[in-house]
Image (spheres, grey):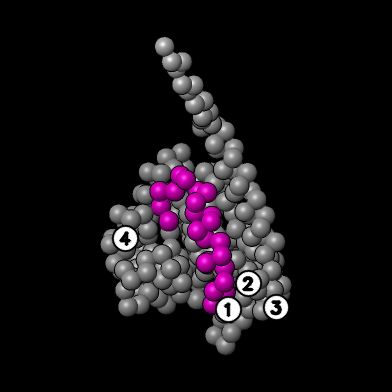
Amino acid sequence: MAAAAPQAPVASRASPAANARSREARLKRLVGEIRACRVCAAQLPFGPNPILSVGKGTAPILLIGQAPGTKVHATGVPWNDPSGDRLRDWLGVSREAFYDTRNFAIFPMGFCYPGRGRSGDLPPRRECAPLWHDKLLKLLPNLRLIVLIGAYAQARYLKDKSKAGLTETVRAWRDYVEEGYVPLVHPSPRNVGWFKKNPWFEREIVPFLKERKRTLLPDL
């Protein structure tokens, strides 16, 4: 009788805990690469200082903004300015909860302060999002909501589903909820006039945003 063919060894499967540790290590390395990025250094008036906050990558909510302002650049803390105060009010969270990376992951379209233009800060650098966003998203497995703050984030993530302008896109926010996105106007004090002209924003979107936050983060 012919001898039985030897069986191939069964491949060992990593435990969920081991997989989580591996992913966290890869995310830590990626964040280090981003913080060391110098691709745009020659075009940045204050030099590179990439701003992001992702922790171990376990947050269910991601906030994607435009680019850091001067105060955020100086402190290294995202949304550490009056715009951030308004954003936290929209979400109904304290500073402590906002900066807890178990709750929120935060990164912008352009990671560094881009400098000033004639009517305010320059647009986010175009190099950042193609370089880093997809790599980051692959290491954030728990995301259930991505908040797109401003036209630049909306253009990248909503693509041809975005409307003719920012106001129209934000007004059509219900069209994007099923895909896990909520588009917002930037909470900058410069947009106070926009808020006054568009009262539906705080009447419709802000309550929804707070309710969605409570669903995803019931302890807050």
Distance Cα–Cα, label 4 vs label 2: 29 Å
Mark identifier at residue 176: 4
State the mark number for residue 42. 3
Is the residue marked by circle 2 packed among few (<14), some (14-19), or many (20+) residues within 10 Å?
many
Q: Residue at x 52, y 43 (%)?
A: 58
Sooner in the amino-acid sequence: mark 3 or mark 4: 3
Q: Secondary structure at mark 1?
A: strand
In the rendered structure, which disc, 3 or 2, sits on the residue that comes first in sequence? 3
Q: CA distance from mark 3 to mark 2?
A: 13 Å
Q: Does 191 lie within the magenta span?
A: no
Q: Residues within 10 Å of mark 4 (few under 14, many from 20)?
A: some
Task: Give the numbered dot on residue 189.
Answer: none
Q: Alpha-carbon distance for marks 4 and 1? A: 28 Å
Which residue is most to the front?
1
Kindly state the secondary structure of the residue where label 3 is placed.
Answer: helix
Q: Name the kind of residue labelled 2 in the image.
A: Tyr
Q: Nearer the viewer, residue 172 or 56?
A: 56
* Residue 184 against residue 14 in the figure, above or below: below
Tell me how far mark 3 sits from mark 4, CA to CA.
37 Å
Q: On the image, numbered disc 2 is attached to which residue?
A: 113
Name the residue: 41% across, 44% down.
Answer: 216
